[in-house]
Amino acid sequence: MLIKRESFVVDFCKGNIAEFKFCLPGSVNKLSQQVLKESHEALIELSKRDDIQGLIFSSDKDHFIVGADIFEFLPTFQRPEEELVGWIKDATDVFDAIEDLPFPTLSAVNGLALGGGCEWLLATDYRIASDSAKIGLPEVKLGIMPGFGGTVRLPRLIGADNAMTWITTGKENRANDALKVGAVDGVVPADKLMAAAIRTLEQAIEGKLDWRAKRQVKLEPLKMNRVEQGMSFGMAEGMVMAKTKGHYPAPMMAVQTLKAAANLGRSEAMALENQNFAKLAKTAEAAAQTGIFLADQYIKTVAKKQAKQSNTEIKQAAVLGAGIMGGGIAYQSAYKGTPIVMKDIQQGALDLGMGEAAKLLGKKVQRGHMSMDKMVATLGKIKPTLNDQDLQDSDIIVEAVVENPKIKKSVLASLESQLPEGTILTSNTSTIRIDELATALEKPENFCGMHFFNPVPKMPLVEIIRGEQSSDETIAAVVDYALKLGKSPIVVNDCPGFFVNRVLFPYFAGFSQLVVEGADFAKVDKVMENVFGWPMGPAYLLDVVGIDTANHCTGVMADGFPTRMARKDKDPVAVLAGADRFGQKNQKGFYQYAPDRKGRLKKSKDDSALELLSSICDAPTEFDKQTIIERCMVPMINEVLLCLQENIVASPQEADMALIYGIGFPPFRGGAFRYLDQIGLANFVAMADKYAHLGEIYQVSEQTRQWANEGKVFYQVEGK
C-alpha cells in the first residue's frame, strides 16, 4: 500500500496505475478541512514518485463525494473576510495539485458527485461516470458559489452558457446529460466502471489519448471573443436577476466571477474565485441558507430517531377520499413503494384519482426518468375501491374527506368499528383539532393527525399532530410512514390549525386589515413577493388555497382563538366567498384567471373584485413598503413565537423548516427564527409595539419581551 489514511487509501490497481480510494468513516464521503489537508500531503508525495504512470480517484461507497463538510461552514464563515480568502486558497491549492500531477488522472464517478465532489472530478484529466451517477454544483442553494475551482474549470470544459446554467440553478445532472455537454468523457454501467477507468488511463499512458491537451484547456482563458462574452454574460445576468429579484446574491456573483475571469489564466481566475467566495460567505443569505441545510439535517435526525421507536411495520396503507389530496397521497405512497387502497363513495372520484396518478407517472416516463413497466407496476400498487371491506388489511389509514368535523368524526368512528384492533388511524385535517376528532373513537391512542400539503407530490412537509391521547407508538409509526413517502415529517402538538395554519392565518388577518384600510391588494402582493421574498403575495396565495377554504378555516381559527383571531366585521375573504369567488378553482377571486398556452392559470386584474371589495374598504390609501411588510409579518412571527413558547413546536429548527417546506417562507431569510436573529429580537418587539393598538395579533407576549431584554438568539453558531 502506497499511502493509508482514515479517509482514503492509495495503492496500485493495475501495473503502474494507482487508485486513490476515498473511504471515510460513515455512510458518505465528504471533504472536511482535515480530509483536504491529508489529501494535499498525499498528492505532494505522489507527485514525487517515479513509479506511478496514472492515478484513478474512486470511492468505496455508493457515492463518489457528496460535497464539502457543511457542518464546518457556519463557524468558518465567522472569520474575517481576509482570513476566509486564505482559507479557501488553501483548499483550492489541493485541487490545483490534482491538476498539476505529472501523470494523467481520472475520476471514476459513482452515485453523487456534488459541490466539492464535482470540483474534484473537474480537476482530473478524465471523468468516467456510472450510468446512475449525478453531478452538480449546488452551492447557490447554500447562499455561496463553487469555491474549489468550479467557476474556473467548468466553463472551460462545457462552455460558459452550460456552466452558468449548472452553477446558477444548482441542479443535479444525470450522467448522460453530463456526457452530452462534455462534463464527463464516458458513461458505463456501474459494474464496468473501474474497467473503463483503467482502460482510459492505459490509452492516455500509451499516447492514444492526449491528456496534456485535455488539461491545458482548463489552464487557459475561455475560448470566447468579446462579442460572444458580452452576449452570453449579459443574458445570464438578466435571467438571474429576473429569477432571484435580487434576493439571492450567489447566482449573480457566480456569473460576474465567470465574466471577470473569462480572459484570465488559471491562477488569476482562481484568485478571483477565492475573493468572491469569501465575500459571499460573509452575507446574511449564506448564513440563512447554510442554516437551512443544517436545520434540515436536524429535523431528519429527529424523525429517524422517532421512526426507530416504532414496532409497527407499514406494509399496506389506505386513504379515504379520492379528491386532490387523497389522490396525491395514493400516488406518493405507490410511487415510494408502499401499496395503498384508495377508497371513495363515488366511482367518478376514483377514476379522477387514478387518472391523476397515471398523468404524474406518465410525465416521468416522457422525461426518461421511469420505464413504462415501472409505471404500470406503480399504478398496480394503488387499489381503487368503493368497498369498505378492502380496508381490512391496512396497517395505516389516512382519512382525507371533506373538512367538516361532524363528517370526519362519523367516518372515523365507522372505520374504527370495522377494522382490526391496532390499525392506525390518521386525519388529513388542516385545522380541526385532533383531540376533538378523537372524541369519536374508542381507542384514541391509535389516532393522530397527518397533515399533507398540496400538491402532495411536490410539497416536502407533513405535519404529524400529536393528540393528548395519541400513543408514542402511533406517532413513531406515522413518522416512519411519512419518511417512507419521502417526506419531511415534523411532529407538533395539537391546537386549532396546528403549527403551519395557526401562524398563516394571522398573516392573512394582517393583510385583510390592510386591504380594509384602503391598501391595493395587488401592490401588497408585489411588496411581499419582490421585497420580502414570498413566492406568492397574500392575495395570490389565498386564491391558490381557495377563498372558500380560507373563509371556512378563518371560522375554525376564530373559534379556537376567540380573542386573538376573531373574525372581523369587514373581511375581504368573507365578501369574496359570499360572491362565489373561490380563487383559482373557479378562476375568480382577488384576481381573475385564464389558462396560458401551456394550460397554466395566469392571473390578471379584475375590476369586479375591486368593486365588490370597495363596499367594505376605506378610500384607496398608499402604504410604504416597510409598513406593508411589518403589518403582514408581525402577526405571523408573533404566532410563531407563541407556538414555541406553548410547546406546539419543539424547536426553532422544526418551526423554520415547517415554514419553508409548508408555505414557502423565503429561504434566503432562513425561516422566522433565523430572521429574528438577523434583525434582533429587541428590534422586532419595538416594531410590533408600533402596531399594538391594532389588536392582539400585534401584541407580543411577556415571554417574548423578556427574551428580547435578555438578548436571546435562537441559533448559536457551533464552534464559534
Image (cartoon, helix red, strand yellow):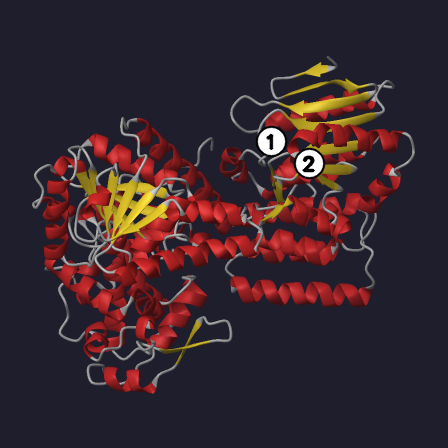
Q: Which residue lies furthest to the right in this view?
A: 207
Residue 399, numbered label: none
Question: Is residue 713 visible from the viewing direction of this image?
Answer: no
CB-based contact (under 8 Å), mark 2 and mark 1: yes
Asked if residue 695 lies left or right of residue 227, the reply is: left
Residue ID for mark 1: 31
The x, y position of residue 485, in whole percent, is: 38, 42
Mark 2 secondary-structure assignment? helix
Alpha-carbon span between mark 2 and mark 1: 10 Å
Q: Residue 569 is drawn in which quadrant?
A: bottom left
Is tag 2's residue or tag 1's residue first in the polypeptide sequence? 1
Amino acid tagged 1: Leu
Would you place residue 220 above or below residue 631 in this image? above
Q: Residues within 10 Å of mark 2 (few under 14, many from 20)?
A: many
Element type where label 1 sits in the image: loop
From the viewer's side, name the closer residue of 357 and 226: 357
Q: Identify residue for label 2.
A: 120
Task: Give residue 437's position: percent from left, percent from top.
Answer: 12, 48
Residue sitting farthest toward the top:
1
Q: Can you tell which quarter of the image residue 229 is in?
A: bottom right
Q: How crowded is mark 1: few (under 14 residues within 10 Å), some or many (20 or more)?
A: many
What kind of residue is marked 2? Trp
Report the side of 92 relative to 661 (left or right). Answer: right
Judge whether 18 appears above or below 156 on screen.
above
